[in-house]
Amino acid sequence: RELQTSGDHPSRRFAHSAVVYENDMYIYGGLDRLGAFEPSPQREDGNSMFCLNLSTCSWSVKKFKGRAPSGQTYGATCVPMKNGMVVALGHGNTEIYVLNFDEQRWKKIYLVGDDLLGRMYHSASVFPDRDVVVLFGGQNRKMNQEFHDTYMLHMIKEDPIL
């Protein structure tokens, strides 16, 4: 059934991600029906996201501190991990970020090992007991390349989110 919601709701969009933490669903990135997404004061930017409280069915915009993902934020994957979420890649992006919901702070994760090419429309999952994010596939339109590779990202233990 469709939920009846109130509050400052997000615009129509696709190629976005969503994560549920405790009793809230956070919406990250995406494109609008015209195939573009321009942040405005009424919408989220890199340091804010729309949040739906699942008890009250009320939308709000949550603000966060720290260095957020920049540039176009569609086609990224978001996965929950302990008290936050991991944002991986997206259109034209080769970076991994963690958002700690308790501290309301973004943190960039630096990868060690094999180069991970930028991609979007990939899938991701978490092995929470091992602090590992697994990425599979996707595509890079700039390189006209589709992927069938798999990466395991071992998250750094010093981060308070982990």
Image (cartoon, rainbow, N blue to C red):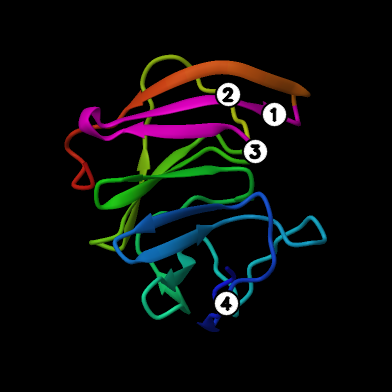
> Gap in Å between the C-alphas at discs 2 and 1?
8 Å
* Mark 4 or mark 3, whichever is nearer to me: 4
Q: Give the residue type at disc 4.
A: His
Q: Identify the element where label 2 is drawn.
A: loop
Q: Are marks 4 and 3 in contact (CB under 8 Å)?
A: no
The reply to whether the C-beta atoms of the residues labelled 1 and 4 are less than 8 Å apart is: no
Residue drawn at the location 76% of the way across and 58% of the way down = 36
Which residue is most to the front?
1
Identify the amino acid type marked 1: Asn
Task: Name the quadrant containing residue 139.
Answer: top right
Do callouts 3 and 1 mark residues in contact (Cβ within 8 Å)?
Answer: no
Distance, label 4 to label 3, CA atoms, is: 27 Å
Question: Is 48 situated above or below 157?
Answer: below
Residue at horizontal 63%, vertical 49%?
A: 74
Residue 4 appears at what percent x and percent y? 55, 80
Between residues 128 and 159, which one lies in front from this camera angle? 128
Q: CA distance from mark 2 to mark 4?
A: 33 Å
Sequence-wise, the earlier of marks 3 and 2 is: 3
For image coordinates 45% across by 14% down, the residue present is: 114
State the residue position of label 1. 140
Of badges 3 and 1, nearer the viewer stands 1
Residue at 37% across, 66% down: 24
Does any portion of residue 7 appear in the rendered image?
A: no
Q: Earlier in the sequence, mark 2 or mark 1?
A: 2
Q: CA distance from mark 1 to mark 4?
A: 30 Å
* Residue 91 pos. (x, y %): 65, 40
Q: Which mark is residue 92?
A: 3
Q: Which mark is residue 117?
A: 2
